[in-house]
Image (spheres, rainbow, N blue to C red):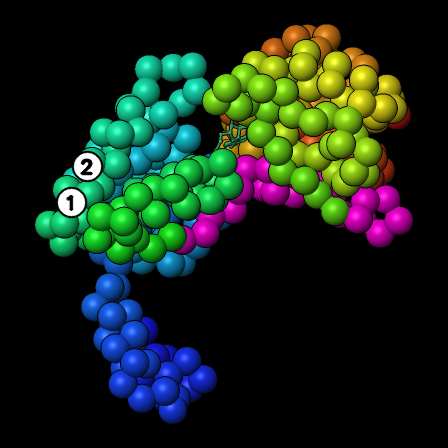
Amino acid sequence: MRFLRSGNKTTAGHGRSSRLIQEKLMNTTPTVWLVGAGPGDPELLTLKAARLLAQAEIVMVDDLVNPEILQHCPQARLIRVGKRGGCRSTPQAFINRLMLRYGRQGKRLVRLKGGDPCTFGRAGEEAQWLRERGVEAGIVNGITAGLAGATQCDIPLTLRGVSRGVTLVTAHTQDDSELNWAALAAGGTTLVVYMGVARLQQIQQGLLAGGMPADMPVAMIENASSPLQRQHACQLSQLCTAATAFKLKSPAVLVIGEVVNAAALAHSYSETSQLAG
Ligand code: SAH
């Protein structure tokens, strides 16, 4: 927070009110941190995450976090709070109450989440919930699984002349409502689909019905960036049968778009993969 004292644009010349804001900010340095653990490879952790882990008294760990990352916090008390879709999970309300209790006690708490905490990770909601109750929470980026998976497979998510953007989307909604697949198909960006393993049929049918070409390449990437990573590519019209034959399991992301073919050109897939096109 040193920059706040240095008379820069943030604080210069605004008198008493800015000093009050400054003091408020100084007093609210978070002790609770919602930290991204990255996708699996422990070396994809940020330096900031490693520092906060080393300083933590308590670490609450989600189940998608690679246990090797916990080497950074041998001193901390570990609390496992898995919330994996479809499995036995720790209720969100319990997790919130625990964070609030330790936050109010001024404990140095890290809530460690897979990937990036703000990408399908609810960190924004959790931080807001804590702040509303007087506990300041900081958020630290992690590398999200979709970006890591694509890069590990040499798939450029954006590519000049091929894809002008990328859309991260979850196939799983709380109320089981369908996504606007037609809009996603028409958007023309590369799609990265999270939480899709149990909804492959809806994804395939929705995109085909929405006008996406049947031969659009799809890469399925399981356990991205970990030693267990497996990947396979197929055409959209083959998605369900290819995923069954490949025995695709969660956690996995799908990358859907012409950019997948660029990876085929680079011969970057392992021998388990057969590329479309
Ligand atoms: N915050 C996480 C996403 C949590 S949602 C992130 O930024 O990565 C959980 C979904 O993320 C899984 O269903 C899967 O689609 C994806 N996911 C998480 N880790 C993964 C991994 N190592 N490999 C592939 N997909 C992963």
Mark-to-mark CA distance, 2 and 1? 6 Å
Percent of width and height locating residue 73: 25, 47
Q: In this rendering, would 69 be left or right of 57?
A: right
Residue displayed at 71% across by 35% down: 191
**Secondary structure beneath label 1:** helix
**Compared with residue 11, is residue 39 higher up or lower down, i.e. above or below?**
above
Residue displayed at 73% across by 18% down: 206
Q: Give the overall secondary structure of the magenta segment.
A: loop
| Mark 2 lies within 8 Å of ligand 1 (Cβ measured) | no
Task: For residue 260, say whether it is visible.
Answer: no
Percent of width and height locating residue 98: 19, 37
**Secondary structure beneath label 2:** helix
Three-letter residue code for mark 1 = Tyr
Total numbered labels placed on residues in the image: 2
Q: In this rendering, would 250 be left or right of 7?
A: right
Name the disc covering residue 98, or none: 2
Q: Is residue 147 magenta?
A: yes
Magenta-tinted stretch: 140-164
What residue is disc 1 on? 102
